Image (cartoon, rainbow, N blue to C red):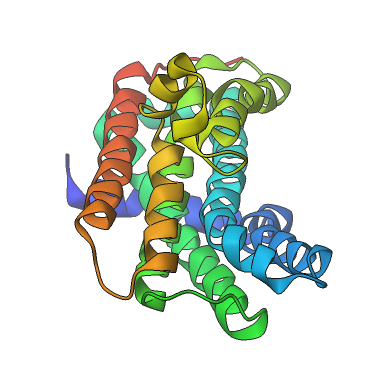
Amino acid sequence: MNPHRTFATAARVLRQLRHDPRSIALMVLVPCVMLLLLRYVFDGDPRTFDSIGASLLGIFPLITMFLVTSIATLRERTSGTLERLLAMPLGKGDLIAGYALAFGTLAVVQSALATGLALWALGLDVTGSAWLLLLVALLDALLGTALGLFVSAFAASEFQAVQFMPAVVFPQLLLCGLFAPRAAMQPVLEWISNVLPMSYAVDGMNEVRRHPDITGDFVRDAVIVATCALLVLGLGAATLRRRTA
């Protein structure tokens, strides 16, 4: 990998996104809107918002980054931009890292806005540090970016990219422990949930919500989410093909 080529790729992607305000709004504002809506859905019972708000603070960024990243990357492929880039002295690792850096920059903004809104405007009550909550939200957004880059290699159209959401994201959403404790699930489902990264994202958020200090479980959860993001980025580089529609 060449740092100069990686940063040049990231700068190009950010310049393109600057002219696509709808994608920026989807990535940056939608998680905030969803948290705002959720807060007033449970307006009569703030404790319910406190119990699930931290978990959703990690889930919403993952979903939006997955959706936008997969579609944006596929658009590059079908327009022929990706083929032209790969014809240049640009390695697959440089390309994937550049995309990850560009979308990761937006993920930082998204996570900061959503975390700030939840804690200081919506009154989300957590025992731990706001910085730890922001860290997990950022890791979740980066994981969503990595998953979006990975699945874009297997979609032939934007419609197919959207179709990957039920296959990749929804099972994790159902099994992450948000709706029912993972230990109370059927053994097979609990085993599956134990290998899904979103489960550890939710666990990490819950650790911040319950404990004032960094715990060993929190460190484990954060490391697993970060490792999964890096692993998926590596798979994305390995499966990257020079192909147009």
Q: Is 216 positioned to the left or the right of 194 in the image?
A: left
> Toward the viewer: 220 or 116?
220
Residue lying at 73% horizontally and 23% vertically, measured from the top left = 159
Residue farthest to the front, as pictured = 184
Residue furthest bottom in the image: 120
- Return the x and y of residue 27 as percentages of the image width and height: 62, 55
Q: Is residue 204 above or below residue 151?
A: below
User: Where residue 153 appears, x then y in whole percent?
Assistant: 48, 20
| Residue name at image x 62 percent, y 41 percent | 179
In depth, the one of 131 and 64 nearer the eye is: 131
Residue 176 image offset from top left, x and y in percent: 50, 37
* Closer-to-camera residue (244/191): 191
- Relative to 124, is 178 above or below? above
Rendered residue at 29%/20% (across/down): 238
Name the residue rendered at 75%, 62% in the picture. Answer: 38
Q: Is residue 227 visible?
A: yes
Residue 25 point in image, percent of width and height: 70, 60
State the image quarter where residue 124 is shown: bottom right
Q: How many marks?
A: 0
- In the picture, the quarter occupied by the C terminus is top right
Observer-nearest residue: 93 or 214?
Answer: 214
Q: Is 217 rendered above or below residue 244?
A: below
* Residue 10 appears in view: no
Image quadrant assignment for residue 157: top right
Is residue 61 found left or right of 42 in the rendered image? Answer: left
Q: Quadrant of the N terminus?
A: top left
Residue 167, image quadrant: top right
Would residue 18 appear left or right of 182 to someone viewing this image? right
